[in-house]
Image: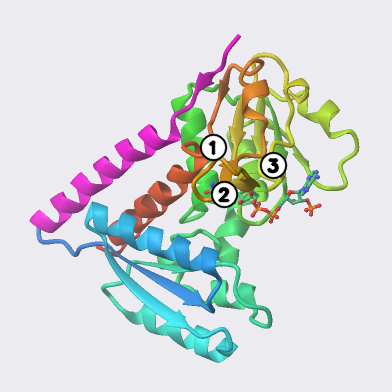
Amino acid sequence: MTAKIIDGKAIAERLRAQIAAEVQQRVDAGLPRPGLATVLVGDNPASQIYVRMKHKACEQVGIQSFSRTLPADASQADVEAVVDELNADPRVHGILVQLPLPPGLDEERVLGRIRLEKDVDGFHPLNIGRLAQKGREPLFVPCTPAGIMVLLEEAGVNLEGARAVVLGRSNIVGMPVALLLLRRNATVTVCHSRTRDLPAVTREADVLIAAVGRAEMVRGDWVKPGAVVIDVGVNRVEDPTAKKGYRLVGDVAFDEVKEVAAAITPVPGGVGPMTIAMLLKNTLRAAKLAD
Ligand code: NDP
């Protein structure tokens, strides 16, 4: 059996086209253009790349973007002052604080400072708390987990009563995606670095989400035949034949697992493009909430 490839790039492109059309309709109707502000503290090169990508994606769909950059030695008060200023700016509908913040800054306090209605990354403690509680609705759901749920939906996966296994328990991916799967009535197991006999646990999964950051850790014999596998990992591995000297691989040994699974996301071109598409979607939603 060769798995169906879940084409995140194509799904994200379709979503972006829909968002662009909706933004244009708003502007034509005289409503404010949605605006996203990014806050970047320090000079982490990966964070700089992510922020640039987000601005470019905004531009492509007609969302206005605002950029605030602070030095690595910015104080807690400096960062919070920027968040306060953006909270008060009516042109800014969504605020994204690029993580991780440099050591010494209190991430939770910074994220908690963002106005709930502008929390397009969904990391405000109240939004995460609501996600974890039955009968409560977060205003925004974190972008990568939200994108994973869209991919599962597009692949036609029935989550009701399904066994889902999430590898990884980070605040950004593993834990919120586990909560989302639970809300959809999957039976969820969350694994981490202390889980015993990982392959035995993953082999139980109808739906397997890998978000560990370990190149090609999930092998073919870790996967139940017919499972749906979502690979969140983005890992660099050396490759002298590649122009940059490296290539990107996921947490899943794609060539092996595609022979066992019913459906699988590739890396790149799976979850990655969905993350930014969901950020744009959340920003549009924030603009609508402000109308
Ligand atoms: P973190 O490093 O924050 O979390 C990794 C998780 O994996 C932890 O819970 C850790 O366990 C667990 N883990 C690590 N090693 C093992 C192991 N050997 N066995 C079992 N569990 C293990 O990573 P993130 O969640 O931020 O990211 C995960 C991956 O997803 C990375 O490759 C990252 O680049 C990628 N990513 C991709 C995005 C996208 O848009 N495509 C967005 C965000 C992340 P413990 O808690 O015990 O330490």
- Indicate whether 229 appears above or below 214: above
The vertical placement of 189 against 95, above or below, is above
Q: Position of residue 38 (x, y in %)?
A: 41, 70
Magenta stretch: give its range: 1-28
At horizontal 57% and vertical 49% (from top left) the residue drawn is: 245
Q: Quadrant of the N terminus?
A: top right
Q: Which is the main secondary structure of the residues drawn in magenta? A: helix
Q: Is residue 12 magenta?
A: yes
Determine which residue is flagged by label 1: 267
Q: Is residue 167 magenta?
A: no
Quarter of the image holding residue 215?
Answer: top right
Q: Amino acid at mark 3?
A: Ala
Question: What type is the residue that disc 1 sits on?
Answer: Val
| Rendered residue at 46%/37% (across/down) | 269
Residue marked by disc 3:
215
Nearest to the observer: residue 75 or residue 255: 255
Cβ of mark 1 under 8 A from ligand 1: yes
Report how far apart the C-alphas of labels 1 and 3 lie in the structure. 11 Å
Colouring scheme, one of rainbow, by chain, secondary structure, one colour: rainbow
Amino acid type at image mark 2: Gly
